Amino acid sequence: MSDATASGVRPVGVAVLGMGTVGAEVIRYMTENAEALAARIGAPLALRGVAVRDLTRDRGMDPELVTADPAALVARDDVDVVVELMGGIDLPRPLLLDALRSGKAVVTANKALLAEYTDELADAADSTQSDLYFEAAVAGAIPVIGPLRRSMAGDQVERVVGIVNGTTNYILSEMGSTGADYSETLAEASRLGYAEADPTADVEGYDAAAKAAILASIAFHSRVSAGDVYREGISRIAPADFESARDMDCTIKLLAICEKLQCADGTEGVSARVYPALLPNSHPLAAVGGAYNAVVVEAEAAGRLMFYGQGAGGSPTASAVLGDLVAAARNKVGAGRAPGESTYAALQVASMDEVATRYHVRMRVADKPGVLALVAAEFSNHGVSIAQVRQTEAETPEGAGEDAEPTAELTVLTHLASERALADTVSALTDQDAVTDVTSVIRLEGMDTE
Ligand code: NAP
Ligand code: HSE
């Protein structure tokens, strides 16, 4: 990095807000690869300052550059590009709005902020013809925002399905392959820098929902925010679910699914949803293990495309941030601008009740004549067609007396059914005395047959 103007070229001034897992790596690569970046941009990058919370920590850099006042840093006249890697919403939101409204480019990895406030940020960027880049906000190192925004701008995207959270994919992969304990695996994901500061956002699906909102908005040129995304996390997935998955030659993945569908009123709409799902081992996303992410895009002309790579961690995420930084800096040098946000299609977001999927329902029932018929009747009464049923003897619960009724575990795999029909079926089953417990309901995705 350099402030020198020996070549007569004005450097591009950069403010980095946050020097944690991602920010530290961005600054390291900016420093180590300064010459190559300058050659690609056509001007050197000059780091004007780095905002952190804790000024007492040694950051291994000139202390003069480190500040606890991000607003003052953003406001400096010699800052052209603001790179936001702090996270959160309330703190970065006004900072980035101020930056964009004063004509500075913004690069951010902050999916939580974007999933709520892209409209506001995009308006601010439009007001000064500034750039707003956020490749790192979805799927870490994987270029997927750029391809959707630019390479596929002439195509009609129909569906985007992805594994977009590294922490949960790491946890599910470990649980599936080694039977590892959920909490231990989560602690390891945090240690490796995959998990958010509060891992609830990862394990309960909020992080994936924010990414689904961003993907759906861009893919379908419509406004989808995090609150529009149906969301379930992985904290209720049990070892027994993996046993069922193995029996069906499936695995379990937390999927983000964004697709066009026909709404109940006949208009075209968008569904965006996140939940753990059974996926056949033959599906391309089933082989995506560890903290890796992958996104499959299906489009009218392109057909099916798959993007795969490291979805979390400091260094991989820094790659996407640096790509955006180079693009933003080039635009500063060449007075150009990246394509802005487009929401012209304005598709409505469909409710989850309008979505149809297949289901794997596991329940504990009394093991006596007529129970299987009764269970089958409840599915039939609600218009849910059964594809497979499997019954195994259930272990007697601890402490149950010798005269306790024998129970069995029943797993039912359905054909395509609506969420409403399935929810009504489960509610009716729960009311039956012969059904002790509906232990789990997991959706099944990626099967060709209906
Ligand atoms: P992090 O490790 O928690 O780092 C956050 C940084 O922001 C720290 O340097 C912290 O300062 C600074 N900060 C926090 N509050 C501040 C305040 N009030 N004033 C000044 N500085 C403040 O976070 P991260 O994992 O790097 O994530 C950064 C962003 O990237 C988030 O939006 C996250 O969602 C996104 N992201 C992360 C990953 C990943 O794998 N980690 C991947 C993709 C996207 P101190 O150092 O003093 O604490
Ligand atoms: N916590 C996120 C994950 C970081 O695990 O995928 C990447 O956005």
Image: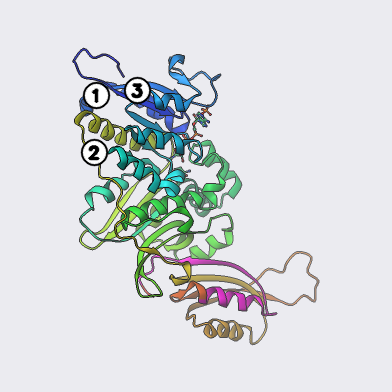
Question: Is disc 2 surrounded by few (<14), some (14 to 19) or many (20+) residues within 10 Å?
Answer: some
Give the residue number, with chain letter if any, for mark 1: 38
Give the residue number, with chain letter if any, for mark 3: 77
Residue displayed at 27% across by 39% down: 129
What amino acid is labelled 1 in the image?
Ala
Question: Is disc 3 surrounded by few (<14), some (14 to 19) or many (20+) residues within 10 Å?
Answer: few
Disc nearest the viewer among 2 and 1: 2
Disc nearest the viewer among 1 and 3: 3
Relative to 331, does residue 220 appear above or below in the rendering?
below
What amino acid is labelled 3 in the image?
Asp
Q: For the C terminus, which image quadrant? A: bottom left
Q: Secondary structure at mark 1?
A: helix
Question: Is disc 1 surrounded by few (<14), some (14 to 19) or many (20+) residues within 10 Å?
Answer: many
Describe the colour scheme in one phrase. Answer: rainbow
Q: What span is in magenta?
A: 421-448
Marks 2 and 1 sit apart, C-alpha to C-alpha, by: 19 Å
434 sits to left or right of 268: right
Q: How many marks?
A: 3
